[in-house]
Amino acid sequence: MVDRSWERRSAVRVVPPARARKLAKVPFVELADGRLQGVVSSGSDVARVYVSSVAAATHAFSCSTNNNRPCGGLGAGYLCKHLQALVKEAVLQYGLERVARYLKADVGEGDDLVDRLDGVKEQAPAAAVFSRFLRHLGYLELPVTAGPVPEAHWFPAGAS
Ligand SMILES: [Zn+2]
């Protein structure tokens, strides 16, 4: 008889929370690799996150799910709501001047940084950003635990 108890132990059960977990709209943002990039939670689906990024200088932007599905709200020349939320959060965390300098965006007093990002859509891989986000969660926010991590319940367990 094959002992399958390890499967039960190691399986991560994804249980819908009784109430929708209140997630930070933008749980992760960083200025790295020549990009403003981060993870933005879906407004409508707690089990979905988007990886959004804007390149410095060119302002080419990208938004897709962590499974590399393109964001439906992204236009060829305008930012989706995830990118807008990402930019807003970056300005909150780093300050407008620092974010604008990093992106080489020309922002005057009272300007909205989003309006100054006039790049075009590009496809940037989401995996690296997403895995850094997971490490960020693991190292910074979660206590060390061997059990199921309730904070991770909203991550998509499969590809769908
Ligand atoms: Zn988007």
Image (tube, rainbow, N blue to C red):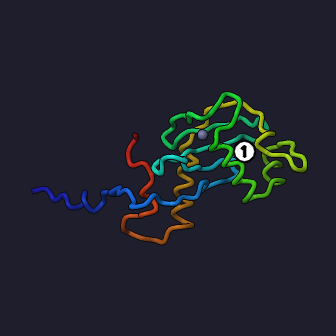
How crowded is the residue under tag 1: few (<14 C-alpha within 10 Å), some, or many (20+)? few
Residue found farthest to the top = 76
Q: Residue at x 76, y 42 (%)?
A: 114
- Corner quadrant of residue 19: bottom left
Query: Residue 134 vs residue 6: left or right?
Result: right
Q: Residue at x 69, y 54 (%)?
A: 89
Q: Residue at x 38, y 44 (%)?
A: 158
Residue 105: where, in percent of width, then height?
83, 42
- As helix, strand or loop, the secondary structure at mark 1 comes to loop
Given residues 84 and 65, the one toward you in this image is 84
Q: Residue at x 67, y 53 (%)?
A: 30
Q: Is the residue marked 1 within 8 Å of ligand 1, measured from its CB?
A: no
Residue found farthest to the front = 19
Query: Residue 150 vs residue 1: left or right?
Result: right
Residue 103: where, in percent of width, then height?
78, 44
Residue 40: where, in percent of width, then height?
59, 49
Q: Quadrant of ligand 1?
A: top right
Query: Residue 127 vs residue 146: left or right?
Result: right
Looking at the rendered structure, the kind of residue marked 1 is Gly
Locate the N terminus and report the quarter of the image it occupies: bottom left
Q: Is 116 located above or below residue 157 in the figure?
A: above
Locate the C terminus and report the quarter of the image it occupies: top left
Residue found farthest to the left = 1
The residue under label 1 is 34
- Corner quadrant of residue 57: top right
Q: What is the tally of numbered marks visible in this picture?
A: 1
Residue found farthest to the right = 109
Residue 97: where, in percent of width, then height?
84, 53
